[in-house]
Amino acid sequence: MTGTQPTPGQAGASAVPTGGVWPQRRGFGVDVGGSGIKGGVVDLDTGALIGERFKLPTPSPATPTLVAQTVAAVVRDFGWTGPLGVTYPGVVVDGVVQTAANVDSSWIGLNARDTIAAELDGQAVTVLNDADAAGLAEVRFGAGRDHHGVVVLLTFGTGIGSALIHDGKLLPNTELGHIDVGGKEAEHRAAASVKERRNWSMEKWSKQVTRVLIAIEDALCPDLIIVGGGISRKADRWVPLLGNRTPVVAATLQNSAGIVGAAMASAADATH
Ligand code: BGC
C-alpha cells in the first residue's frame, strides 16, 4: 500500500482513536453499467460517498480489456491505491465470470478480478454481481436498514438483477431475473426495458412485475422486497399497483448503491 489515497484510505483501516473519535473506514467501489463506469470513495461506516463520484462512458464494444482499462482510469483519477470492489452485470464466482446475459459474450470464463488487477498497481480487486452489490448497500444503509429476516432486492433495468440477503448475509448470484414465470423468463416479462420497448403503461407493466414477485415469494418467502433500478425513482407510481403479498419498498441509495456495495464487499474480502 503506497498510501497516496485520502487518509486513512485503506479499506477496513482503523487506529487508536484520538480524542475519542474513530477515523473513517474508507473503501472504494466501481459500478460498471451499460452506459457509464462510475467510482467513488465510500465511508464504510455510514455508506456515504466521500466527495464526488467520477464517471467515464462505458467503452463500446464493452470488451474485458477496454472495461478493465476504464475501471483503472476511474480508480487512478482518485489516486486510490487500496483494495477496491467492482460490479459486473452477471454471475461471478471467485472473480471468474460465468454469464453475460446483457453484455459482450467475451466475458464468459474470464477471470475479471485478475484482468482488472493487471491494469492497476497490484491492488486487491473484488468483483461481484451488480445487484448483489446494490443489495448489500441497501440492506445495510438504505431501504432495508434495520430489517431482519430475508430481504430480496430486485433491480429493474435492461434485465432484472437480484440479491438475496438474510440478516445482512448475502447469498450471491441468485439470478432471479432468469427464473421461469408462466413460460417466460422473469426479465423478459418485466424488466424496465420491456416496458419501454412495448410502450406499456405503469398499470400494464406492474401486472407483469406482480407475477414475477409472486413467483419469487412463493419460492423464498421474503420478509421484504426492495425494488431498485432507474424506474424505482418513480416507485410511487407503480409500487401501489402491485398485487403481491410481501411488503415492497423502493431502494433509497439510487445510483450510488453499486459503488457502496462494491466497496463493502472489497472491505469484507480484505479483512478475511
Ligand atoms: C443478469 C444479472 C444482472 C442483471 C442486472 C441480468 O440479466 O443476469 O446478473 O444482475 O441483469 O444487470
Image (cartoon, rainbow, N blue to C red):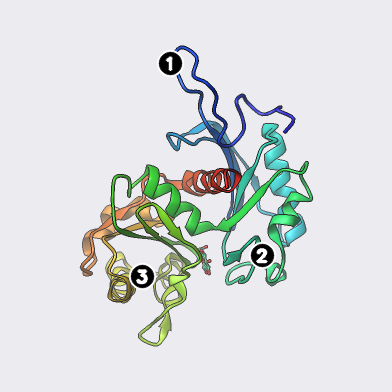
Secondary structure of the residue carrying tag 2 is: strand
Disc 1 marks a residue whose amino acid type is: Gly
Whether label 2 touches label 3, CB < 8 Å: no
In screen coordinates, is 188 left or right of 64? left
Q: Earlier in the sequence, mark 3 or mark 1?
A: 1
Secondary structure of the residue carrying tag 1 is: loop
In screen coordinates, is 246 left or right of 155? left
* Residue at numbered disc 1: 20
Residue drawn at (43%, 71%), measured in percent from left and top? 176
Disc 3 marks a residue whose amino acid type is: Trp
Count of all numbered marks drawn on residues in the image:
3
Q: Residues within 10 Å of mark 1 (few under 14, many from 20)?
A: few
Q: Which mark is residue 200?
A: 3
The answer to whether mark 1 is within 8 Å of ligand 1 is no
Q: Earlier in the sequence, mark 2 or mark 1?
A: 1
Residue 75 in the image, given as x and y percentages of width and height: 68, 40
How far apart are the alpha carbons under marks 2 and 3? 37 Å
Disc 2 marks a residue whose amino acid type is: Val
Secondary structure of the residue carrying tag 3 is: loop
Residue drawn at (57%, 62%), measured in percent from left and top? 89
Q: Earlier in the sequence, mark 2 or mark 3?
A: 2
How far apart are the alpha carbons under marks 2 and 1? 43 Å
Q: Where, quadrant-wise, is the N terminus in this rendering?
A: top right
* Residue at numbered disc 2: 96
* Up/down of 212 relative to 251, above or below: below
